[in-house]
Amino acid sequence: MLVCGIDAHAASFAVCVVDQLGAEVTRVRVPNSPAGNTRLLGWLAELTEVPTRVGIEGGGNWGLRLAWSLTEAGLDVREVPGHYTARERRRLRGGGRSDPRDALAIARVVAREQGLPPIRRDDINRQLKLIVDYRRTLLVERTRTINRLYRDLAMLEIHTPPGALRHRRGLTNTAKALRGDPRPQAEIARRRLARITAITTEVTDLDRTLTTMVRSCGTTITGLLGISTINAARILGEVGDITRFPTRDAFAAANGTAPIPASSGNTTRMRLSRQGNRRLNHAIHHMALTPIRHPGPGREYYQRRRASGDGTLHALRALKRRLSNVLYRQLLADAGRLQEAPQG
């Protein structure tokens, strides 16, 4: 049984094929272009045995088109995380780093690891992820620009209440205060103010787009307490195909809500997991904050954990683990319902 590892870059692909024991069989380098993709498919077909699995580091960006082409050709294509490659590269003989060595490390990871994630399809979930990620970069830029504008206004001796620049009225009042000021720093402040306004308008437009897309995909997770439309878009975008998680425990491990055993000797305890998808974990964290403030099963569970001696953070983590199960069950139900819809 042969497996293939591909190190994807902007200009080229480094490809290595190994057997089931990890021994190198052959390697090749092709350009990252439509012609290179065709050449690689032909090269794989000419091997005495076609690899059963293909792993790509960078399969979500530089290697995405190649991954789709390989999937259409009937190959099982998987995404190899970069830290897996780095860990395997340290086991190789010799030192240094090169694309062929990375391709060999990737191939050995594919031969050993059976639970690698599949390459994302270009479906609505992936499109939601792209928009939510872009929206987040805009919010980060807006926050950075607002902080710099506060500094400018302070140096210009213009008093601005905290939080005022996040609202339209505050932006309008600030624009009036800066009007006609000939100082260079006032001109810079006006430019920052224009950028903040433009970003706010763009984020509002993206929110409308996300609302329409979330409604069109037929999800019901927006009916869960603590999941807004934006939070639902983040969850759907990060999860993708929920059926790739065989159990709710696997889903909890993937989103970082499952605690990690940290026992030794006579001491038995669990510690916080900082692994898994942190963006998905952040979405579940926001989901958990709402039930604490509203009467219902979530608040009752949180209060029981606090009454049993758990600290605030520990009780919140326990609630997040519980909500992960609820979310998994809801996503799985949605997947089954949407799969049966065409038959009905």
Image (tube, helix red, strand yellow):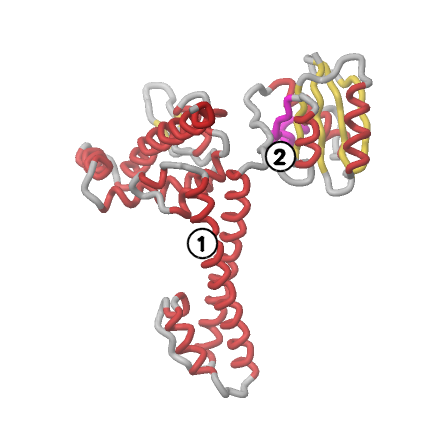
Q: Is residue 327 left or right of residue 308?
A: right
- Please, what secondary structure does the residue beneath circle 1 have? helix
Q: Which residue is mark 2?
A: 82
Q: Which residues are magenta?
A: 76-89
The Cα atoms of the two marked residues, 2 and 1, are separated by: 35 Å
- Residue 211 place in picture, x, y as percent: 43, 49
* Residue nearest the observer in this picture, 111 or 101: 111
Q: Which residue is mark 1?
A: 208
Q: Is residue 253 above or below residue 169?
A: above
Instruction: Mark yes or no: residue 91 visible.
Output: no
Q: Is residue 147 left or right of residue 114?
A: left
Of labels 2 and 1, the one closer to you: 1
- Residue 234 place in picture, x, y as percent: 45, 43
- Residue 72 place in picture, x, y as percent: 67, 26
Amino acid type shown at disc 1: Arg
Q: Is residue 27 above or below residue 257?
A: above
- Please, what secondary structure does the residue beneath circle 2 have? helix
Query: Is 343 covered by the magenta stretch?
Result: no
Instruction: Mark yes or no: residue 52 visible.
Output: yes
Q: Identify the residue at image location x=44%, y=29%.
A: 338
Q: Identify the residue at image location x=65%, y=40%.
A: 61
Query: Is 85 covered by the magenta stretch?
Result: yes
Q: Is residue 195 left or right of residue 328?
A: right
Q: Is residue 58 above or below residue 184?
A: above
- Indicate the quadrant where residue 126 lies: top right
* Disc on res. 314: none
- Mark 1 burial class by Cα count in 10 Å: few <14, some 14-19, many 20+: few
- Residue 33 place in picture, x, y as percent: 78, 39
Amino acid type shown at disc 2: Gly
